[in-house]
Structure formats: structure tokens, C-alpha cells
Image (cartoon, rainbow, N blue to C red):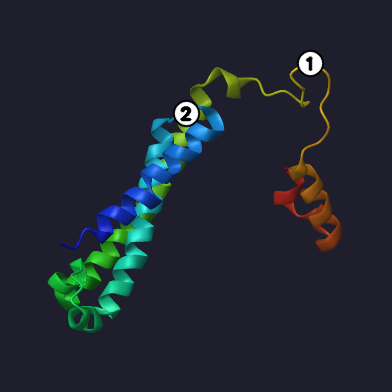
Amino acid sequence: MGLGEATIFACFGPLLFAGASIAATGDVTPEVLLASAGVGLATVGILHANNARDVDADRRAGAFTLAQTCGFHGNMIAFVILLLGAFGLGIVTIGAAVHASETREEAAAPTAEILSPAGEEAAPGIGIHIMGLLRAAFDLNTHPMVMAL
């Protein structure tokens, strides 16, 4: 029936992101779903490119894919649409996330220190240690992107 693309989109897009979001925050926001659609489209684009390459082998094996019905030019158009959609949604997602962070109260007043649940200063997380190792290993202390961290 050729539902591989829809299954891959759902599993590697909204379902994966929703599960990760629920595990991390207990909630799924519209920004998460928007980001998941772009990643899902990119993943389907990769699958579609592979299926387009394997049309003859899939036909001999009795497997039915969307790429078999599209033809050569249709497959090229579908691939471009999938990738443009993925990158377009990526840009829209960044804009939505920036807008959402500007409107949330939590983002308006960030704290300078990390506090534990008891209120005392917490030990630095693993991310801080990793950045220190990277700075030492690659002399990243002067790189503007690293200095902002």
C-alpha cells in the first residue's frame, strides 16, 4: 500500500518529539510540534530518495513504494518539495520559538545562578564541564560563539 512515508513521518517527527517533550517537560507545545514536522519531512525526504533509487529492486521484490508511482521526474519534484518543506518549517520554527520566548515571563528575567530545589547554589552540570574540556582542547576561549555560553 506504500504507507512507509507516512509511518516514518509520524514516528520520526511528531511522535518522537512529543514523547521527548513529555519526558523532559511534561507537556507538548505548538513549537515542539512545528519543529517535529520539519524533522519528519527531512527524514521522509531521505527515505524517498532511497526508495527512488531502489524502484526496480523493490518492484522485483514485490514491495510497493510511493516512488514507484511518481516516476523519475515526480520523484525529483517530491524530493525537492520535502526538503524545501523541511527547511522552510525549520525557519518558521525558529521564528515561532523566538516569538514564544519573548512573550513568556520566564524568559523575561533569566537568573545568573543555578539553584537546587532547596534554594542553594547547585554544582555545575555536565554541559559546563564539557564546554570547559572543549575550550581547553581546541583553544575555544576566543571564539565568539563559545564566549557567549
Which of the 4 image quarters holds residue 61? bottom left
Q: Position of residue 15 (x, y in %)?
A: 38, 43
* Residue situated in front as seen by the camera: 7 or 50: 7
Q: Position of residue 29 (x, y in %)?
A: 42, 30
Figure check: 124 above or below 26: below
Identify the residue at horizontal 74%, vertical 19% (top origin). Answer: 117
Point out which mark residue 127 bears.
Answer: none
Identify the residue at horizontal 72%, vertical 43% (top origin). Answer: 148
* Residue situated in front as seen by the camera: 105 or 42: 42
* Dot 2 alpha-carbon crowd within 10 angstroms: few under 14, some 14 to 19, many 20 or more: some
Identify the residue at horizontal 37%, vertical 58% (top origin). Answer: 42
Specify the amino acid type for callout 1: Gly
Which of the 4 image quarters holds residue 16? top left
Q: Position of residue 6 (x, y in %)?
A: 26, 54
Q: Secondary structure at mark 1?
A: loop
Point out which mark residue 119 bears.
Answer: 1
* Residue situated in front as seen by the camera: 65 or 90: 65
Figure check: 112 above or below 48: above
Q: Secondary structure at mark 2?
A: helix
Disc nearer the start of the sequence (2/1): 2
Specify the amino acid type for callout 2: Ala
Q: Which residue is mark 2?
A: 100
Identify the residue at horizontal 18%, vertical 76% (top origin). Answer: 62
Q: Quadrant of the N terminus?
A: bottom left
- Indicate left or right for 148 with 59 as reference: right
- Tell me if I can see residue 95 in this picture: no
Figure check: 75 above or below 31: below
- Indicate left or right for 149 with 80 as reference: right
Q: Residue furthest left?
A: 69
